[in-house]
Image: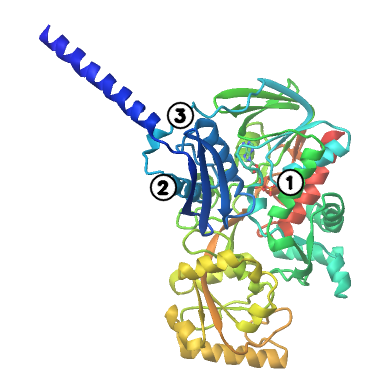
């Protein structure tokens, strides 16, 4: 009995204390606007947090340097914080660093109220948008990267209704994270610069770059339709391009168009606008898990999950698979290529987990070239992300050296060749060297000021007045580096690189300051995937068409053979995304 009374007393006390603390919190006046600072992926995030009637009423981001497109994560978190009156909302998948930096900034602002976070009385949990358990459209597209949105828009232009499913909270996939460059023979910048090029030359480059392991018919379609696709993006989707182009490795001529600001954001943003304009539903946070077939094997729909809800998407005409590659799926990487283990970082979106490949394999689709996984040669040594400051290489204005101060590869070679060469150098890294004139003339590197500052802060890039000083920073053999530069300048004078026969114009290095950036290869593109024909129809292991199923983009295989050339992916997703959209709408 005594025990029971004691328990009642303890409980009463506890309830009283909770009541008391809530009472105290209710009495704390939080109202006002407070500034807070956090550290995101690209640097400082500064916010103004406004509280009215003890409720979060507004969060304004005053400064941020996050990846364009992924900065959407801050809007999502703002809405959720306001909806729940809480700072404890989930991070946005695919934008972890941005989410953490934003939360840090908001918490920092809240600290200035002098109160504890519990003073914000929660108004419930985040409500997900309501969904039906079944949807029907002519065409269901799985994956809202460049290929998926292109396919959906084209299907709609061909008279079909479409729904796009995207598993992440933010669309764009690897396309968004890319530089967005687009290889197009005969493009308007080439015409302006009077550069000779042809579809045939591009076709040959694609095959040569892929060691002739490509399906020639698919490579031919890519080469013959690349320019048309670029014009479609420019004229119909309203993608803005810079007035210069880049010389990507392995191409025999400069033919790579650059979207405005040299990022994939322009394409994803404009494709999203077109999707909205055409009222094509984009169901985000929706993961396709299984393809549905009728008794004859025709694909007639998709099963998907949305939170803990199961949704069936029925397709009257076809399902288009545009789920991207598997660069972020370690198990799958190692399954197909044991050299692609966890020691190699990745440039990929966290959504690139090969879901499409797993789904089609279950229904007997043919997979090709799965072992060919490309690393991008010059990535961040700490995070694996692409380094756009390093595009000074594609502007023909930098060389790659090793710790010993020597060049070791042609700087405009194929990505796989450079990557392999880098791995064989001391420490498995390369050092990119350039001078001030390259920086002054640069059109790309200078567009990435945030990345530049971030690299300097993390000691991955140095700017120094002399070659010796720059070399010393990374403990590179300075005397040898100076010799390497003298030799290179002589080659530039003679118009021929006697060591590596570097393609393009050779520009000598001049006065300082000088720049050196360290980098190493990271998984970038998975060349293998689903076998398709020239109509983007998926082929089974018997070589027959799987009715009702189409695929485009990185999920497909055999277009690029052993190795995709830089800037061919955006051409690929546009060309085959359009074909898939047309075919599925029939
Ligand atoms: P591509 O360049 O071929 O268009 P991306 O990587 O740009 O490829 O886009 C692929 C998109 O597909 C990504 O946004 C990714 O999140 C999405 N995705 C991957 N798997 C699924 C899935 N199971 N369900 C829905 N979307 C998916």
Q: Nearer the viewer, residue 396 or 340?
A: 396
x, y percentage for residue 368?
66, 47
- Choose mark 2 or mark 1, whichever is in front: 2
- Choose mark 3 or mark 1, whichever is in front: 3
Q: Are marks 3 and 1 in contact (CB under 8 Å)?
A: no
Q: How many neighbours does mark 3 have within 10 angstroms: few (below 14), some (14-19), or many (20 or more)?
A: some
Q: Earlier in the sequence, mark 3 or mark 2?
A: 2
Disc 2 C-beta below 8 A from ligand 1: no
Q: Are marks 2 and 1 in contact (CB under 8 Å)?
A: no
Rendering quarter of residue 364: top right
The numbered dot on residue 122 is: 3
> What SS does tag 1 mark?
helix
Task: Give left or right: position of 486 versus 474.
Answer: right
Q: Nearer the viewer, residue 486 or 245?
A: 245
Q: How many marks?
A: 3
Q: How many neighbours does mark 2 have within 10 angstroms: few (below 14), some (14-19), or many (20 or more)?
A: some
Q: Quadrant of ligand 1?
A: top right
Alpha-carbon distance for marks 3 and 2? Answer: 19 Å
x, y percentage for residue 209?
70, 64
- Choose mark 3 or mark 2, whichever is in front: 2
Alpha-carbon distance for marks 2 and 1? Answer: 46 Å
Name the residue located 69 percent from the left edge and 20 percent from the top edge: 134
Disc 1 C-beta below 8 A from ligand 1: yes
Name the residue located 72 percent from the left edge and 49 percent from the top edge: 269
> What SS does tag 3 mark?
loop
Rendering quarter of residue 257: bottom right
x, y percentage for residue 328?
54, 48
The numbered dot on residue 147 is: 1
Q: Earlier in the sequence, mark 3 or mark 1?
A: 3
Position above or below: 490 against 171:
below
Residue denoted by label 2: 112
Alpha-carbon distance for marks 3 and 1? Answer: 41 Å
């Amino acid at each position: 009995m005594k025990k029971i009374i004691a328990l009642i007393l303890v409980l009463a006390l506890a309830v009283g204390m909770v009541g008391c603390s809530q009472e105290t919190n209710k009495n704390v006046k939080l109202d006002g606007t407070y500034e807070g600072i956090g550290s995101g992926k690209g640097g400082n995030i500064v916010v103004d947090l406004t509280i009215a009637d003890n409720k979060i009423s507004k969060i304004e981001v005053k400064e941020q340097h996050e990846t364009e497109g992924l900065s959407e994560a801050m809007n999502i978190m703002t809405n959720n914080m306001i909806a729940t009156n809480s700072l404890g909302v989930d991070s946005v998948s695919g934008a972890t660093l941005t989410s953490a930096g934003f939360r840090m900034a908001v918490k920092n602002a809240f600290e200035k109220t002098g109160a504890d976070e519990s003073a914000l009385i929660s108004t419930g949990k985040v409500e997900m948008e309501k969904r039906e358990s079944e949807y029907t459209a002519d065409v269901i597209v799985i994956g809202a990267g460049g290929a998926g949105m292109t396919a959906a828009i084209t299907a709609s232009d061909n008279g079909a209704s479409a729904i796009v499913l995207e598993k992440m909270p933010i669309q764009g996939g690897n396309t968004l994270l890319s530089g967005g460059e687009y290889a197009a023979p005969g493009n308007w910048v080439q015409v302006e610069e009077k550069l000779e090029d042809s579809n045939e030359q591009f076709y040959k480059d694609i095959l040569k770059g892929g060691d002739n392991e490509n399906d020639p018919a698919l490579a031919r379609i890519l080469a013959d339709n690349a320019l048309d696709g670029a014009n479609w993006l420019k004229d119909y989707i309203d993608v803005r391009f810079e007035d210069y182009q880049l010389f990507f490795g392995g191409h025999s001529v400069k033919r790579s168009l650059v979207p405005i600001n040299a990022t994939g954001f322009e394409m994803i943003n404009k494709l999203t606008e077109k999707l909205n304009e055409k009222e094509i539903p984009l169901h985000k946070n929706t993961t396709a898990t299984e393809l549905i077939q009728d008794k004859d094997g025709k694909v007639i729909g998709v099963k998907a999950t949305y939170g803990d809800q199961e949704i069936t998407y029925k397709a009257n005409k076809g399902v288009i698979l545009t789920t991207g590659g598997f660069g972020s799926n370690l198990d799958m990487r190692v399954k197909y290529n044991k050299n692609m283990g966890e020691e190699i970082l990745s440039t990929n979106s966290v959504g690139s987990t090969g879901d499409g490949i797993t789904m089609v394999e279950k229904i007997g689709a043919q997979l090709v070239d799965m072992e060919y996984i490309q690393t991008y040669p010059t990535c961040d040594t700490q995070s694996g992300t692409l380094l756009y400051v390093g595009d000074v290489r594609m502007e023909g204005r930098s060389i790659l050296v090793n710790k010993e101060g020597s060049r070791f590869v042609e700087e405009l070679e194929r990505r796989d060749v450079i990557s392999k060469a880098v791995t064989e150098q001391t420490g498995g890294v390369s050092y990119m060297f350039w001078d001030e004139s390259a920086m002054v003339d640069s059109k790309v590197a200078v567009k990435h000021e945030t990345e530049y500052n971030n690299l300097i802060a993390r000691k991955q890039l140095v700017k120094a007045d002399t070659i010796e000083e720059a070399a010393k920073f990374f403990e590179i053999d300075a005397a040898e580096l100076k010799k390497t530069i003298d030799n290179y300048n002589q080659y530039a004078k003679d118009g021929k690189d006697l060591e590596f026969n570097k393609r393009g114009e050779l520009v000598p290095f001049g006065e300082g300051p000088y720049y050196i950036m360290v980098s190493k290869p990271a998984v970038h593109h998975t060349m293998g995937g689903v076998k398709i024909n020239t109509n983007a129809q998926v082929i089974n292991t018997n070589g027959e068409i799987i009715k009702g199923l189409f695929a485009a983009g990185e999920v497909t295989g055999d277009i690029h053979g052993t190795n995709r050339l830089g800037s061919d992916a955006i051409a690929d997703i546009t060309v085959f995304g359009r074909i898939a959209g047309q075919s599925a709408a029939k």
